Structure formats: structure tokens, C-alpha cells
Amino acid sequence: MDRGNPVSTSAGATVSGSRLAGFLLVAPLLLGLSAFAIYPFLDVLALSLSKSSLGRQFQHWPVLTNFAAIQRDGDFQAALLRTTIFAIPVALIQLALGLAIAMMLHSSLKQARWVRSLILLPLMTPPMMVAVAWKLILAPAGGLLNGVLLRTGIIDQPVSFLGTMPAAFLSVAVADTWQWTPFVAILAYAALQTLPDEVFEAASVDGASPRTIFWQITLPMLMPTLLAILLLRVVIAFKLFDLVYGLTFGGPGFSTTVTTFRIWRTAMQEFDVGLAAAQTLVFAILVSIVTLPITWLHKRSETRSG
């Protein structure tokens, strides 16, 4: 009577036990992903296909009516364009400024730890407090910037920075740059710390100038990290809401109404949660399309550096 191979039975039990142990280790991650990613996405998708108000969701299912409304909504389409025009240049400017600050910290201020702590102050400030501070700075009556410009004779009457275009749009960009450039600088500084000193020492011995070292060695070695930082900043810039809410409330008119603020108005002022959900999905698709080239460049730079 053949009772089977005990070695095979033992090996099969070991494999089954390993699979069970692996599943148990991954289970908390799967549960967290389901609770915080999959379920909210399915809920937003269902809302976008339904007629839902703030007080009564899923009243009926007109399916594509909300998306058809978006196609006819010129204000929302303008907000999408406005957000894209804001996010990409601001992220690039912040990347350049952050890298410059990181280079200065790395080369000249290695011992000045208090400087590294100081530049984190804007990042640690709550966004609404940043908006309040910049609103006081830019105020036409008693504002710091208008006061300086009037005393120096650059202007002869106060300027409404937040009440005219394009000053209002640029003011939001300046406030966002003040808040988020330290974030880029710290990440770039951390990346600089990981670069091997031997490469730079060898380049210096060969007579390479600091400019050549930066363009030919430092920047190529940092490129994968810089593209990852740029990707992160573009996504965060697309999510701009607090500064617009606190500084301009979307004005003057709708000239600083970005997509997140328009979605908030649809849901919280017009009480059309279904339309707001559809706008959110369209916005997510736009962000994905815009970030695809950055993701492709990041993967390509990692392949080259590897």
C-alpha cells in the first residue's frame, strides 16, 4: 500500500505554511488599502454617476449626466487650465530655488544647523496661517509691501495685489513658493549628502571648474531624485486650495479659482455632491496625464544612472 512520499508531503506543507504566513503579513496592508483607497474611489465613482446632494446621496442614477454637465461648464474647464498653468511653472521654479538653496547649504553652510532649521519654518507653518500672513503683507492699506514701495517712491498710491489681475495670481504663486521651496531644498539637500565625495575630488584634481562639476557630475547624478521631487511638487501644486481660500477666495471674479476650489464650491455652496465627484474624477485624470511625462523621464533617468 502506497502511503505517499513523506518528504513531498513535508515540502508541500512547508510551502502552504509559507504562503499562509506571507498572506497574513500582507493582510493588514490589503485591509488598509481597501479602507483608505479602494472604498473612497468606488464611493466617488458611484457619486459621480448619481444625482446626489449634500444632505441626500444617491437619489437616482442619471449615469453620465454629471459628465455631460462638465462638458458644458466653461468655468470648470477654465479652472482646469488655470490650475495647470499654475502648477507646472510654480513647481519648476520651486525646484530650481530649492536646489540652489540645497547647494549653498551643502557647500558653504555645513555647520550652520540653525540655518537648516530656519528654512523649515515656512513648511511647518499651517497653510491658513501662511495665507493670513501674506494677506497682511499684501494688503493695500497698511500692508508691509505697499508700505515699502510707497516709502521708496516706486509707487505713489497703494496697489491692490489681491484684487487685480495678474497680481492676484502671481501673489498666490509667491506665497506658495515661499511655503514649499524649503520642502524641495531639504529633499535636494538630503540627496546631495548621498553623493560620493570621491567623484568630486577626482574632478577637482583633473582641473574641472565648479560650473563643470555641477553640470556634468552633480546634476546628472541628482536627476532621478530631482524628477521625483518635481513629480511630488506638481501633484501637490495641483491640490492648491488653502492659499486661494485664504488670500483671494477665487477672485477677483473667478481669475484665481483653481480646480480644487471650484470643486469645493460645487459641493459645499451649490450642494451638488454628484457633480463635484464627477469633477474630482476628471481632475484626477488630468493630473495623471500631466504627470505621465515626468514619470517617464524619472524612469529613464534611473535606468541611465543605474
Image (spheres, rainbow, N blue to C red):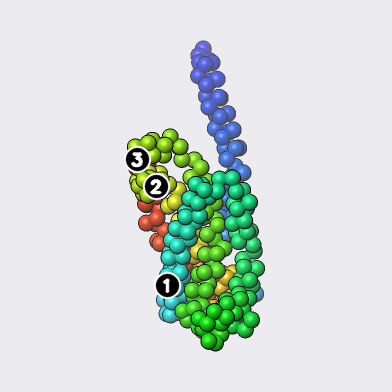
- Mark 2 lies on residue: 210
Q: Can residue 69 be seen by looking at this rendering?
A: no
Q: Nearer the viewer, residue 41 or 76?
A: 76
- Residue 81's tag is 1
Q: Quadrant of the C terminus?
A: top left
**Residue at 36% in and 46% down:** 209
Q: What residue type is labelled 1?
A: Leu
Q: How crowded is mark 1: few (under 14 residues within 10 Å), some or many (20 or more)?
A: some
Image location (x, y in percent) of residue 284:
47, 63
Q: What residue type is labelled 2?
A: Pro
Q: Residues within 10 Å of mark 2 (few under 14, many from 20)?
A: few
Image location (x, y in percent) of residue 36:
59, 55
Q: What element carries label 1?
A: helix
Mark 2 / mark 1, whichever is N-terminal: 1
Q: In which quarter of the image is residue 178?
A: bottom right
Q: Is residue 127 left or right of residue 220?
A: right
Q: What element carries label 2?
A: helix
Mark 1 / mark 3, whichever is N-terminal: 1
Image location (x, y in percent) of residue 263:
54, 73
Q: Is mark 3 on a helix, strand or loop?
A: loop
Q: Is residue 87 left or right of residue 179?
A: left
Q: Distance between the residues labelled 1 and 3?
A: 48 Å
Q: Distance between the residues labelled 3 and 2?
A: 9 Å
Q: How far apart are marks 2 and 1 (CA)?
A: 40 Å
- Residue 289's tag is none
Q: Can residue 90 be seen by looking at this rendering?
A: yes
**Residue at 54% in and 66% down:** 176
- Mark 3 lies on residue: 207
Considering every residue shown, the one lying at the far front of the view is: 152
**Residue at 34% in and 37% down:** 206
Image location (x, y in percent) of residue 171:
52, 74
**Residue at 61% in and 44% down:** 28
